[in-house]
């Protein structure tokens, strides 16, 4: 039976199934394609009336497919030239992939970089096909054990489906929990950098319009990730299997308490740093990307400081929004609420300078219903009492330009998860915050998952522009991730994601999140403390009305 395919505003009739790549041609700039608005591999067979729209690396739906294919290529190259090495991928500085060596006493060197580069280029030149097959879980388990991938075999125990996917390239077999490009010839854009004791792999990014960003080292961020990895490894929570094993072995309460104690330890360390310099610090600035847990953190920090005889007050930057209609416009002519210029920076600096000098100040209060500032509380701050300010621009020096640097203590907060499905498949750092945001928006704003997913690209754009660049100037980075949180949020997030229709443009992201969540064992939220950062998203926080 014949069917019509629309591509490039032209309609063609086919009498038998045809591959997407045969419809759109051999253009290696295309990574995947929308088939009736749903993301498909280029090897997908079209057998009904369809509209085809190719997807390049400039678009966000191409990024996970290309990046997974690149990890496959790197793993295959290592398998070919260093078959004795066990490697682990994780996300790292400069939006890159870090290659860690799990063999004791092995570290990277210049010769390794050259050999890896040469082997990857050879594989790309050969243009070897990546072929997917569906096998039973039992057969996949045997295959992975034979290949020495015990970590991949172990996670299959928690896979709800009875089958699994395997990708074969030449004689190499692996699975990256993602769609893939058709062949190695498509994976032709990457950079390999020596980054002792491992390697950095860079790849094209959609926010760079498909270009590979210039490498920017970020020592503060790097140390935070290293610390997160060390804690996760020490507690056995560096993989989903490890987290599930802890739940099975020690129970829900032990894992929850373990993670909450990690937050308590960080708060204690932070409190000590502030106490040691209490004579100088007047402004404690707290910032981080969306859904990092800033509100709960600021409250818990206040309690930590109170326990040390320090009595801080809190001031929200939200109260310094300019009146509605005064906001700058973004490139689309829409009000840019994320811009620092949407805030009255001069008034904020004047108020902070006056408070630090011991003067009495009438603070503003932004009325979101009226869309303008009204009079707020009258405040006078003792000279030994610091002020906690919280907001996305709190670490931006422009926001506190009139306050001397030595009087400011800057805290960056974000969930820095160092958790892998298996050694070759790390969980994306951003997806964790996105899940938090989906759950919170539904819990407190009755917003659907589709609405949250629709606004997420703009949220991310604002983070890249205004937030991430301030992390390196922080005095302390607080990791707000809890190893148990996805096990708790699973029951909240899955129903919301599963409501998204396969024809929706947001289905690919929803599908990816579902694929990640389904491996976690469920934990009821009964034993999650009321002051936990996780309560900020699932509800039941003792700070909810703060």
Image (spheres, rainbow, N blue to C red):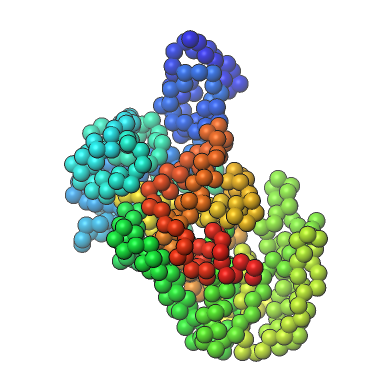
Q: Which of the 4 quarters of the picture holds residue 142?
A: top left
Residue 264: % across, % down: 45, 74
Relative to 84, is 98 on the left or the right?
Answer: right
Residue 315: % across, % down: 67, 74
| Residue at x-position 43% and y-position 63% | 482
Which residue sits furthest front? 526
Asked whether the viewer can see residue 223, the reply is no
Q: Is residue 519 above or below residue 503?
A: below
| Residue at x-position 51% and y-position 51% | 492
Q: Is residue 353 above or below residue 396?
A: below
Task: Look at the image and tell me in which quarter the C terminus lies.
Answer: bottom right
Relative to 113, is 330 on the left or the right?
Answer: right
Q: Which of the 4 quarters of the picture holds residue 217?
A: bottom left
Residue 41: % across, % down: 44, 31
Q: Nearer the viewer, residue 321 or 366?
A: 366
How many callouts does the rendering have? Answer: 0
Q: Is residue 227 above or below residue 352?
A: above
Q: Nearer the viewer, residue 80 or 48?
A: 48
| Residue at x-position 64% and y-position 80% | 313
Asked whether the viewer can see residue 377, the reply is yes
Relative to 276, is 396 on the left or the right?
Answer: right
Q: Nearer the viewer, residue 498 or 333?
A: 498
| Residue at x-position 47% and y-position 40% | 511
Residue 26: % across, % down: 44, 25
């Amino acid at each position: 039976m014949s069917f019509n395919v629309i591509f490039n505003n032209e309609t063609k009739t086919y009498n038998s199934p045809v591959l997407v790549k045969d419809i759109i041609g051999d253009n290696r700039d295309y990574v995947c394609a929308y088939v009736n608005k749903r993301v498909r591999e280029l090897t997908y067979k079209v057998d009904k009336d369809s509209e085809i729209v190719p997807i390049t690396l400039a678009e966000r739906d191409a990024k996970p497919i290309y990046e997974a294919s690149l990890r496959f290529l790197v793993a295959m190259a290592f398998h070919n030239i260093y078959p004795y090495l066990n490697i682990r991928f994780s996300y790292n500085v400069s939006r890159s992939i870090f290659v860690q060596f799990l063999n004791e006493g092995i570290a990277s060197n210049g010769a390794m970089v050259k050999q890896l580069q040469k082997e990857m280029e050879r594989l790309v030149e050969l243009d070897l096909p990546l072929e997917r097959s569906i096998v039973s879980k039992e057969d996949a388990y045997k295959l992975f054990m034979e290949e020495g991938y015990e970590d991949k075999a172990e996670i299959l125990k928690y896979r709800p489906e009875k089958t699994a996917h395997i990708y074969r390239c030449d004689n190499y077999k692996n699975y990256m929990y993602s769609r893939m490009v058709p062949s190695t010839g498509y994976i032709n854009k990457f950079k390999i950098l020596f980054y002792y004791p491992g390697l950095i792999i860079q790849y094209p990014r959609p926010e760079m319009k498909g270009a590979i960003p210039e490498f920017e080292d970020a020592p503060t961020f790097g140390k935070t990730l290293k610390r997160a990895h060390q804690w996760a490894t020490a507690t056995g929570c560096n993989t989903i299997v490890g987290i599930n094993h802890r739940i099975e072995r020690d129970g829900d309460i032990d894992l929850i308490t373990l993670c909450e104690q990690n937050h308590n330890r960080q708060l204690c360390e932070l409190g000590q740093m502030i106490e040691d310099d209490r004579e100088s610090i007047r402004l404690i600035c707290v910032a981080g990307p969306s859904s990092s847990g800033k509100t709960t953190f600021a409250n818990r920090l206040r309690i930590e400081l109170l326990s040390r005889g320090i009595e801080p007050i809190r001031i929200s930057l939200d109260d310094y929004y300019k009146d509605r209609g005064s906001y700058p416009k973004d490139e689309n002519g829409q009000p840019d609420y994320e811009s620092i210029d949407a805030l009255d920076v001069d008034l904020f600096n004047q108020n902070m300078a006056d408070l630090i000098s011991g003067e009495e100040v009438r603070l503003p209060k932004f009325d979101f219903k009226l869309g303008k500032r009204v009079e707020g509380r009258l405040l006078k701050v003792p000279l030994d009492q610091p002020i906690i300010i919280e907001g996305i621009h709190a670490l931006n020096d422009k926001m506190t330009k009139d306050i001397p640097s030595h009087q400011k203590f800057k805290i960056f907060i974000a969930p820095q998860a160092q958790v892998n499905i298996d050694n070759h498949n790390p969980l994306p750092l951003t997806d964790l915050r996105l899940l938090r945001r989906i759950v919170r928006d539904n819990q407190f704003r009755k917003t659907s998952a589709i609405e949250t997913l629709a606004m997420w690209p703009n949220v991310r754009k604002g983070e890249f522009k205004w937030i991430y660049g301030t992390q390196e100037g922080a005095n302390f980075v607080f990791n707000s991730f809890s190893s148990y949180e996805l096990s708790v949020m699973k029951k909240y997030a899955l129903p919301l994601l599963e409501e998204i229709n396969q024809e929706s443009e947001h289905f690919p992201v929803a599908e990816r999140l579902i694929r990640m969540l389904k491996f976690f064992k469920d934990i009821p939220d009964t034993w999650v403390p009321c002051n936990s950062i996780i309560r900020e998203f699932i509800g039941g926080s003792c700070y909810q009305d703060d």
